[in-house]
Image (cartoon, rainbow, N blue to C red):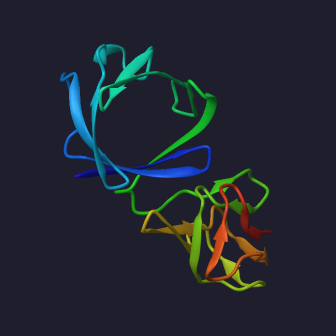
Amino acid sequence: MHKLAVTIDDRVYEIEAGVFPQNEEAFALRVNGEWVTVRIPELEAAFAEMEWMVVDGRPYEVTFHNKLEWIKAYGGLHMLEVHDMAATAVQPVGNGDGRVKAPIPGLITRVMVKQGQTVRAGEPLLILEAMKMENEIRAPRAGVVSALPVAANQSVLREQVLVEIS
């Protein structure tokens, strides 16, 4: 079973599918444990030019950004993030200044570094639990942990600063 964590405007959905369709128009997905039927009438245009799909018999007008950064639907434009749950580690959001930000909202279950500690690039910093999956957040670069504004059992929002490395 293939699993994805899809975040739409800070709300996370766990999506499971046996096999994603290659040339079938309809298929079943489990979204947060509930089975839904999805039909994409023009599958060859999916995600590039898709304008509508049918979910459990209800049509939805949808447009996806070509790099899946946003989705446009009836409610307007929504930020979109797709994470393959089979990946071993979630990549932290970083902007090159040493701040490591949460890639998804979740709960810090374990902190493996201390302020003042020297870390290597790729070294585990903490565990962020989201959708019942433990995501290991690793250091994007070598340096010294200059700030650690989070603690175990703390909930965090997407792009919240977790660790600063200088």
Looking at the image, can residue 125 be seen? no
| Residue occupying image coordinates x 51% and y 32% | 68
Residue 15, above or below 40 = below
**Residue 91 drawn at (x, y percent):** 55, 56
Residue 11, above or below 148 = above
**Residue 101 drawn at (x, y percent):** 69, 60
Which quadrant of the structure image shows residue 162?
A: bottom right
Residue 11, above or below 58 = below
- Horizontal side of residue 67 vs 164, given as left or right: left
- Horizontal side of residue 18 vs 108, given as left or right: left
| Residue occupying image coordinates x 77% and y 75% | 149
**Residue 143 drawn at (x, y percent):** 73, 72
| Residue occupying image coordinates x 51% and y 24% | 66
- Residue closest to the eye, 19 or 100: 19
Which quadrant of the structure image shows residue 154?
A: bottom right
| Residue occupying image coordinates x 61% and y 50% | 10
The tally of labels here is 0
Which quadrant of the structure image shows residue 43?
A: top left
Looking at the image, can residue 63 be seen? yes
